[in-house]
């Protein structure tokens, strides 16, 4: 049996209101379009999460809302303060406690980029994988029965996409 992680960096956020706290910045129009495109890409490939772990920042909550709108049967997200600006070790700990077979994690850089690089045995050839731009999404498979058995460099990339590939 295997487990699947859908790892997404939040979509492009707005900097138009400098008085907003970083935690409260919304998506901009490009971010909204990007999240919808990622949702379509996931749906077309049958990658429907049964659990979503997300930072509780406004931009990650909105990213999930736009992605979820394109998925049939997606779950409610679990919004966690612990994923706000988390490092890869903290993100892995959150993942190890997951209960779904296909888990989506939506978080921030640099943690998301570092987590992706450390989880996979062989990175994809995509030139943007190491940078992990906004709304970048990797589908990573692990040949384990429990998330607690996931270790560094044990995942296989089943897909990686950035919004520029789609729109």
Image (cartoon, helix red, strand yellow):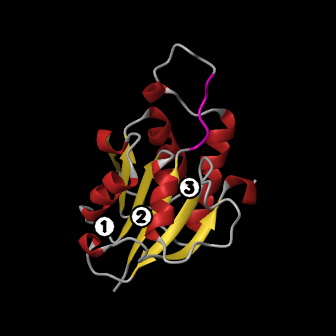
Residue closer to the observer: 88 or 56: 88
- Please name the residue that numbered disc 2 is placed on: 49
On the image, the x and y values in percent for residue 3 come to: 37, 76
Residue drawn at x 58%, y 43% is: 11
- Discs 2, 1 touching: Cβ within 8 Å: yes
The residue shown at (27%, 64%) is 96
- The question of residue 39 being in magenta is answered with no
Is residue 32 something one can see in this rendering? yes
Q: Left or right: 122 with respect to 89? A: right
* Residue wearing tag 1: 100
Query: Which mark identifies residue 70?
Result: 3
Q: Earlier in the sequence, mark 2 or mark 1?
A: 2
| Residue 166 appears in the rendering | no
**Disc 2 packing (10 Å; few <14; some 14–19; many ≥20):** many
Left or right: 131, with 58 as reference point: right
Q: Which residues are magenta?
A: 11-15
- Distance of mark 2 from mark 1, alpha carbons? 8 Å
- Quadrant containing the N terminus is bottom left
Residue occupying the far bottom of the picture: 1
Determine which of the numbered discs, if any, sits on residue 24 in the image. none
């Amino acid at each position: 049996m295997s487990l699947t992680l859908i790892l997404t960096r939040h979509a492009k956020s707005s900097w138009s209101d400098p008085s907003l706290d970083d935690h409260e910045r919304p998506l901009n129009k490009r971010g909204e379009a990007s999240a919808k495109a990622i949702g379509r890409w996931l749906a077309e490939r049958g990658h429907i999460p049964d659990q979503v772990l997300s930072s509780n920042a406004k931009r990650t909550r909105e990213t999930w809302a736009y992605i979820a709108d394109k998925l049939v049967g997606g779950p409610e997200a679990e919004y966690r303060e612990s994923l706000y600006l988390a490092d890869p070790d903290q993100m892995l700990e959150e993942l190890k406690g997951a209960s779904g077979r296909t888990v989506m994690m939506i978080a921030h850089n640099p943690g998301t980029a570092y987590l992706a690089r450390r989880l996979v045995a062989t990175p994809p050839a995509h030139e943007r994988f190491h940078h992990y731009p906004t709304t970048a999404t990797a589908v990573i498979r692990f040949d384990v029965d429990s998330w607690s058995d996931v270790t560094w460099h044990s995942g296989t990339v089943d897909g990686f996409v950035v919004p520029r590939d789609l729109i």
